[in-house]
Image: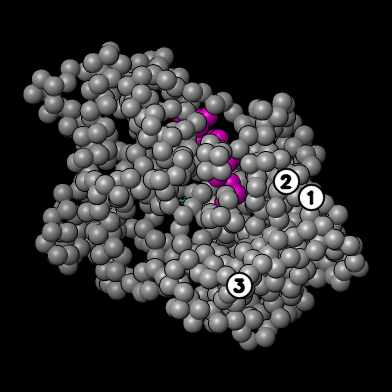
Amino acid sequence: MTMISPLQKARLQYKPKLPVALRNGISAVKTVEGAPTQSVADQDKINALFPATYGSPQIVFESGEAKAGKAINVGVILSGGQAPGGHNVIAGLFDGLKSINKDSKLYGFLKGPDGLVKNEYMELTADIIDAYRNTGGFDMIGSGRTKLEKIEQFETGRVNCEKLGISALVVIGGDDSNTNACLLAEYYKHNNIGINVVGCPKTIDGDLKNEFIEASFGFDTACRVYSELIGNIQRDANSAKKYWHFIKLMGRSASHIALECALQTHANICIVSEEVAAKKQTIAEIVDYIADVVAKRAAKGCNFGVALIPEGLIEFIPEMKTLIAELNDLLAHEEKVFSDLSKEDKIKFIADKLNPALSKTFMSLPQTIQLQLCLDRDPHGNVQVSLIETEKLLAEMVGSKLKAMKEQGSYKGKFSTQSHFFGYEGRCAAPSNYDADYCYSLGYNATALLNAGKTGYMSSVRNTINPADQWIAGGIPITMMMNMERRHGEDKPVIQKALVKLEDKPFKTFAANRDVWAVETDYVYPGPIQYFGPTEVCDLITKTLELEKA
Ligand code: FBP
C-alpha cells in the first residue's frame, strides 16, 4: 500500500462545508430561474454561434422538498493546468450524484479532453474518491490541454458517452476549456443528442471570474504557497543583505497572482502587466522604474530586495504585444517551414518576415528570448509565457542600467541578483480550507445543475467572503461570459479573460502603498498554509477577494 503523510491522513477526514441550499442533498434543491442573459460583448455574433444555449437565465438554488431522484451517469474531465482542489470538485460531484440516487455513476475521462475522444476512462468508485479527498493534484484521472472544438471530436465523444449511458459531462477547466465546454453543450443541445454539459471554474491564474464566479478555484492555495516562499526569500534577503531576487510568478496573462502576493508580502516591487499596458510603458521604462527603486534602497544601505514579475508581462508591453500578435499569425501560417529551420535560420526567417519596426524590436532582444518567443504555441494558440524568462531579462537589463547610472555617479550600490520562477510549486498543493470547501461545493452544485436538466452552464458558488452558511449556489450561462477574440489568426468566441482592473480596490490598495514598500523593508511573512487550528489562521480568504467585496 502506498504510504501517505500524517498530514494527508488527517486531511482525508476533513469534511468540506456546503452552501445551505445543497445540504439536504441534490434531490431537495429548488431551482429559481432569473431573467434571460446576454453575452458581455459581441452579442449578435455570440447569439448566432450559440443559437441553442444563448440567453439562458441565471439560476439560484434554494432548499426545497426532497423528491426521489433518478440515477444518472456522468462523465468528468479535468482540463488544462493543475489547480489545488480539483479532486474535491470530483468528490463533490460524486457525493452529489449519490445523493440523487445511489445507483448514479461517475466516470472519469483520463488525461483531459483526449480521454473523451479516445474512450479512455475509469469508473470512480467510493474507494477511489475517498483516497483523494482534500488532496492536491489532478492525478486521480489526469488532465490535458487538447482543444475540443471539432464536430468529429463531439461525435466520437457522443458515441463514447452513449456506450457508458452517460447523459451529462462536467468539464473542470479555465476560460479556454469552459469555452470548449460551451461549444460541446451547444452542439449536443442543437442536435438533440441528450448529453448536457456543465463547467467548473478552475485556474490558479484567477482570471476566470465575474460577478457570479467570484473566484476560480486554486487561486487561493497557489497564492498562499507563493506568498510563503516569497516571505521566506524576503527573510533571507533581509538576513544576508546581498541579493536582489527577481521572482516571476505564474498567471499566464493576468497579474492577479503577482498582485495578491504583493498584497500578502509587501515585496519591494511588483510590476502589474495591466498597468504597463494602460500606461503604454516600454521595457526601458519598466527597467528605469526598477533601477530607481534599487538605487533608492542602496542609498539607505539596503543592497537587497524582492521584485515580483507577472508571468504574462511580456505580452502587455505594447511593443512586445504587437510583436507577439504578429508572431502568432506568422507561426500559425508558416508552422511547417519554420519548424524545419535551425536556431539561427529561425531568427533570420522571422526578422525578414516582420515589418521593419517590429523586426528591430525583435532583433534588440537577447537570442534566448527571441527563441523563447517562437516556441510552439499551446493548443489554444497562446504563447507559452511560462517558458519566457522575463525575470532574467529584467535582471540583466536593470544590471546594465545601474552600471550606466554608476558611471554617471547617480548610483553607488552593489547589485547581485537571484532569479526564481514560482508556478509549478503551487499548482498541486493540498487545497487550503477555502479551496477545499469551495471546490467541493462547486462539484456538488454542478450535480444540482445537471439534475435540473441544465446545459451550457458554469457552476457558481458565491458570497464566499462570508461563512459557508451564507454562500449562494447556482449557475450562470457560459455564453454570458463570452466575447470574440483573435486566436490562431482567426476571430473566435471565447470567455472574456478577467484581467486586473486598475480602478478596483486590490490594485488601488497596492498602488497606495507601493512607494513605501519599495523603499522601506516592510516585509510580511505569511508562513505556510494552516489546515488545522484557529479560524483566523485557517479559514482565510485572499486579499483580492476581501478587497473586491469590501
Ligand atoms: P490553466 O489556465 O489551464 O489553469 O493553466 C494555467 C497555468 O498554470 C498558467 O499559469 C501557466 O502559464 C500555464 O498553466 C503553464 O502551462 P503548462 O502546465 O502547460 O506548462
The part of the image, by quadrant, that contains residue 404 is top left
Q: Distance from label 1 to label 3 (Cα)?
A: 25 Å
Q: Nearer the viewer, mark 1 or mark 3?
A: 3
Q: Which residue is mark 2?
A: 470
Looking at this view, is 270 or 341 the one in front? 270
Magenta stretch: dominant secondary structure: helix
Residue 24 on image: x %, y %: 86, 54
In the image, residue 335 lies in the stretch drawn in magenta:
no
- Residue type for callout 3: Pro
Crowd band around label 3 with a 10 angstrom C-alpha radius: few (<14), some (14–19), many (20+): few
Q: Secondary structure at mark 3?
A: strand
With 533 as the anchor, is 458 left or right in this view?
left
Q: Residue 453 appears at what percent x and percent y?
A: 74, 73
Identify the residue position indicated by label 1 in the image: 20
Question: Residue at image x 17%, y 64%?
Answer: 354
394 vs 196: above or below: above
Indicate which disc, 1 or 3, sits on the residue closer to the N terminus: 1
Q: Is residue 180 visible?
A: no
Q: Which residue is mark 3?
A: 36
Residue 459 lies, in percent from the top left, at 66, 60
Asked whether residue 518 is in view, the answer is yes
**Residue type of the residue flagged with mark 1:** Val
Q: Amino acid at mark 2?
A: Gln
Q: How many discs appear?
A: 3
The tag on residue 464 is none
14 or 425, nearer to the observer: 14
Whether the residues at callouts 1 and 2 have beta carbons within 8 Å, the answer is: yes
Q: Alpha carbon of mark 2 to alpha carbon of mark 3: how far?
A: 25 Å
